[in-house]
Image (cartoon, rainbow, N blue to C red):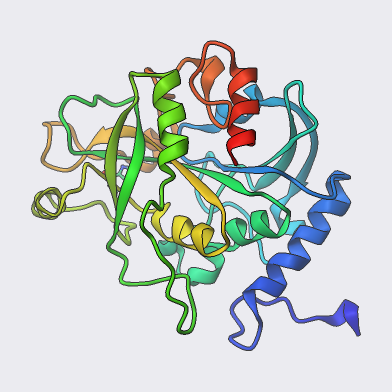
Amino acid sequence: MRNEANLDLSDPNVDPFDVAAAAADVIADRTGAPRHDVALVLGSGWGPAADLLGETLAEVPNTEVPGFSDAAVAGHKGMMRSVRIADTDRRALVFGTRTHFYEGKGVRAVVHAVRTAAAAGCSTIVLTNGCGGLNPEWPPGTAVLIKDHLNLTANSPIEGANFVDLTDLYSADLRAIAQEINPNLDEGVYAQFRGPHYETPAEVQMAKVLGADLVGMSTGLEAIAARQAGMKVLGLSLVTNAAAGISEARCPTRKSSRLAKRPHNVPASCLPPSLPVSDPRSIAKELCHVA
Ligand code: 8IG
């Protein structure tokens, strides 16, 4: 009967952690790596990052892994890959795309990659995104470390009476390492809105009053699931536009967000999880050791 296991995440009788375990089994099989160490979720503009991590040893289409579906956003690849982190035996599991809350597939689908990463053995996850910026000193192309978030989705990935502590959700240790290596990295509070519409200028002002520096449509729910799974979280935002009403410019269209710039204050050789550093290899090791 094992082959007939129900792995439909949208079925409330199915345990999402069972689906994650099944996904991790397929990944282990298809990549030849019984376990992975670090996971990376690529958001808008962060695509080139994974190429710099090390050698891609295997690529698996999302559609072949239980619980995953193909990319919904143009310019995002519905693929995951297993990358050997340069000069180490460690493996990064890189998700080329994510499921957004606004797709309406449910919050289980949104955090499935995170739970799969945990089931695959990852103890650290790097969550990246493209977002709107509230600070006029962050022009499009600025990478910002996420220090905390406001979850404005009115939802949670956690089911049942599980009271997960979100103090220090975005690991202070990992942020300190990132800033040691690249003092140009500012920190900010990320507000996750439901989307898919952008905010009104009044909503951006509301977010500002609440303490937000960045507005986007991802990451927060994933970070919560990562913490529940016991992983350390590093969050990196790429400001791709000024949030509505912050500058004269309009919010990005589908077409322009596909052309999202890569970060200008993070050298190409320094993208996560190798992180900004003169020698990306050493930080890759360091990041893994902290994990
Ligand atoms: I790229 O201005 C990108 N994603 N909510 N607001 C929200 N999400 C975004 C934005 C933005 N820009």
Q: For the view shown, which residue lies furthest in the bottom direction?
A: 13
Looking at the picture, tell me which residue is in the foreground, 134 or 236. Answer: 236
Residue 247 locus on image (x, y percent): 12, 32
Residue 65 locus on image (x, y percent): 75, 59
Q: For the view shown, which residue lies furthest in the top direction?
A: 278
Give the quarter of the image for residue 95.
top right
Looking at the picture, tell me which residue is in the foreground, 149 or 66. Answer: 149
Question: At 56% across and 53% down in the image, what residue appears?
Answer: 231
Instruction: Work out whether 232 lies above or below 44.
Output: below
For the N terminus, which image quadrant? Answer: bottom right
Ligand 1, by image quadrant, is top left
Question: At 58% across and 26% down in the image, what residue appears?
Answer: 274
Question: At 64% across and 60% down in the image, what residue appears?
Answer: 69
Instruction: Work out whether 186 lies above or below 205.
Output: above
Question: At 27% across and 45% down in the image, what residue appears?
Answer: 189
- Asked whether, in this view, residue 208 is left or right of residue 63, the answer is left
